[in-house]
Image (cartoon, rainbow, N blue to C red):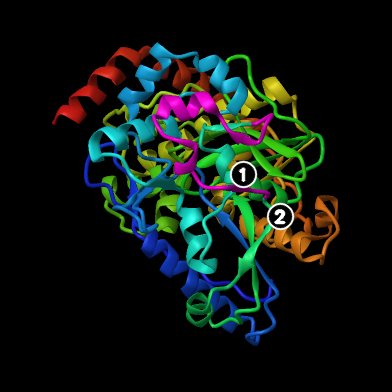
Amino acid sequence: MLGNAAAEYKLYTPHSSWAEQDPAEVGDTVLKCLRRAAREAALTRRDVVAIGLSGTFHSVVPIDARGEPIGRALIWADGRASADAEAIKRDFDGGGLYRRTGCPIHPMYLPPKLRWLRREQGEAAGYRSIKEYVIRRLTGRWVCDLSVASGTGMLDMARRDWDDEALAIAGIRREQMGPLVETTDVVGRLAPDAARAAGLSAESVVVAGAGDGVLASLGSGAIAPGQMTVTIGTSGATRVVAERPLVDERARTWCYYLADGRWVAGAAINNAGIAFRWTGEKLLRAGRRYEQIAEWAQEVGPGAGGLLFLPFLTGERAPFWNADARGVIFGLAIDHDQRHVARAALEGVCYRMRSIYDALVDIAGVPREIRATGGFTRNPFWLQLLADVLEQPLRVPLVQEASALGAAELAMIASGALPDLAATARFAATEPAIEPDATTRETYRRCFDLYMRTYWALQEQFAEVATLQRAL
């Protein structure tokens, strides 16, 4: 890595279940980071041959006839289309749609979101992801890479084209979605305005790239049989790479496209780092002193004194796809304080990761190696905690920006610097494995069992309180 730049953009949550981002703010931030990274790396304008892109899955923004966004984008955490998702489950063959698209019926995916948008905001000229908007800012072209398309719930995996039934369910025409391209396709050269803003040459090419989750598997070097990645960032996920689409009989997992005929089967949760951050900032009032929160957590033992935290703050995705699930702190006693709450929050996220790990193991088998990526790997305590709950050793790649590295690797392939995906293994060195602590095994098995039984006991109450919150 020669240069690195990072910047945040705002998450808008004006109402319960709403989660939005401004595409223009994201595009501006991308250009700023390109400029800063190139400057840090001491690169000249002509040193950057190609730019590979990684972007979040499941976002959608309506556009007008000129191609300009109409308002903000609905992102993966947005759950306002939950009633539309339920209607789709009731009126259509959700199982058949899942088997074709690899995406269960859930308000995160586009069929429910598009129904909500069309009903509440009217018909738009088109619908695009934030990543497509960024590509247009960089090159002037509208394209949708097959990876991001595979995360919409509207791509027929076998035909690699928009699914006719999904389009009909959403109520839109094929031409309202973006034209599809391979993840290693060169989209075009930097547009003059983008080149000036990024401080780069207009001769630099832009490669379509893929979704951030599947690129985390590539960038961490976990694309061989028997390898799995676990990621905790704002959200969390487990993934394995397969040479064909891989789905689950119980629809607990999803399947998205990577590149070169490779598919990534996995499962993801909404509430990972976002739940940890909420606990620190809003519940414990510790601001952004995340190290302090982790230190509090370390001051109490495994199991947090019998306190359970179900971190369903923004509904939930895999493995049970319950958009109405809500956060629960269960077992509060007089001797509990902020230390127990902090530990229970971290353990609760790890129990969520265990639930999707188990679902993926059912369809792909027990992994021979797990590689851990995401912001949580910078916290040794949290990393050890996940190893303990999963009862599996974890290896951390030396390069932690795994999704960005994966995007760069696809750009290398597109520009001829690498011959194929297999050649990316040269970047895949890891730290020594974090071994699970055997002394915590029985405690965490007992806590996880209680955690799951508590979740299932609250199904009726989850639906009722979610309805109440939408009404209020």
Residue located farthest toward the left when viewing the structure as drawn: 472
Q: Position of residue 225 (x, y in %)?
A: 82, 35
Q: Residue 184: which disc?
A: 2
**Which sits in the foreground, 343 or 134?**
134
Q: Residue 314: which disc?
A: none
Q: Position of residue 135 (x, y in %)?
A: 53, 61
327 relative position to 4: left or right: left
**Amino acid type, label 2:** Thr
Residue at image x 44%, y 42%? 176
Give, as a single range, the part of the protein colored magenta: 157-182
Q: Residue 147: which disc?
A: 1
Q: Is residue 209 above or below residue 332?
A: below
Secondary structure beneath label 2: loop
**Which sits in the foreground, 6 or 376?**
6
Q: Is residue 186 above or below residue 380?
A: below
Query: Rounded to the nearest whole Å, what is the CA distance between mark 1 and mark 2?
Result: 10 Å
